[in-house]
Image: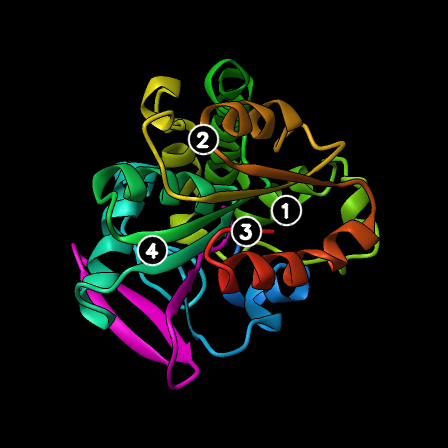
Amino acid sequence: MARFGVRGAELDYDITGRDGPLVVQLHGLTSSRERDELLGLNLARALRGHRILRYDARGHGHSTGSPNPDDYGWPSLADDLLALLDHVAPGERVHGVGPSMGTGTLLYAALSDPDRFSTLTLVTPPTAWKSRVAQAEAYRASAAAVDRGGIAAFTERDSTAPVPPALADAPETRSSVPEELLAAVMRGAAATDLPPKSAIATITTPALILAWSGDHGHPLTTAQSLHRRLPGSQLVIARSPYGIMAWPGLFAEFVSTGGIV
């Protein structure tokens, strides 16, 4: 593992593979690269002939963070991503993949630096635009629960959320955010949203969208809206754990062919 300092945080990252194009893999809200691996979301595991960069977002996993909610908005996390890429692969075009919060981060990064990404794989796109309003309220309520009862209150609240069919066989996991940062992380998530639809329509990078059904926090409406607006994008929906099992192979083919499945 290695560390990279950016805007008051230390990002913990690792790179596997010695040669080939670089793939950067992100994770979702309150998760980490270790937790995503437990959930079967290490999509780069089937990829060969590439270098794989995985890191924990600020305030998550082994990375440090601040108590400022503004640091956890997706545009801010996109700045972290681009700074990390400038550090480990200056000037190099890369393949990006990430679920939920990682999808939001990648979209802002692609808008900020259009020439940086060879492909984008957007996994379980989160609530956005109209559907973000209710989700933001739920995040603020989670932050208030942390203020009142600490991480135990958050865990209890989180445990009542329905599990999407595609994760029916996944092991039980807990938040990867330290208790002292959790409320700030949730408030930052509540205050952020995907870029405007008109801006997304300007992204020309080949995109693969991997979604699952039955999850109000990651509705198919967002995935379908992204699919309509990203030119030439491809949408694959998992409706059971078997669907997720196919994702690493689909991702490997997409990256290896430069955006063709």
Question: Which is nearer the N-term, disc 2 or disc 1?
Answer: 1
Amino acid type, callout 1: Thr
- Residue 260 badge: 3
Q: Is mark 2 on a helix, strand or loop?
A: loop
Q: How crowded is mark 4: few (under 14 residues within 10 Å), some or many (20 or more)?
A: many
Identify the residue at horizontal 55%, vertical 67% (top origin): 44
Tell me the distance, in whole angstroms, between the alpha carbons under discs 2 and 1: 39 Å
Nearest the camera: 192 or 240? 240
Q: Which of marks 1 and 3 is nearer the N terminus?
A: 1
Q: Distance between the residues labelled 2 and 4?
A: 31 Å
**Quadrant in the rendering for residue 159:** top right
Residue 37 pos. (x, y %): 61, 66
Q: Mark 2 points at which residue?
A: 231
What distance separates the C-alpha of mark 1 from that of mark 3? 40 Å
Q: Can residue 142 be seen in this view?
A: yes
Find disc 4 in the rendering and name its residue.
Answer: 58
Q: Residues within 10 Å of mark 1 (few under 14, many from 20)?
A: some
Mark earlier in primary sequence (2, 3): 2
Residue 155 badge:
1
Q: Which of 31/18 is in front?
A: 18
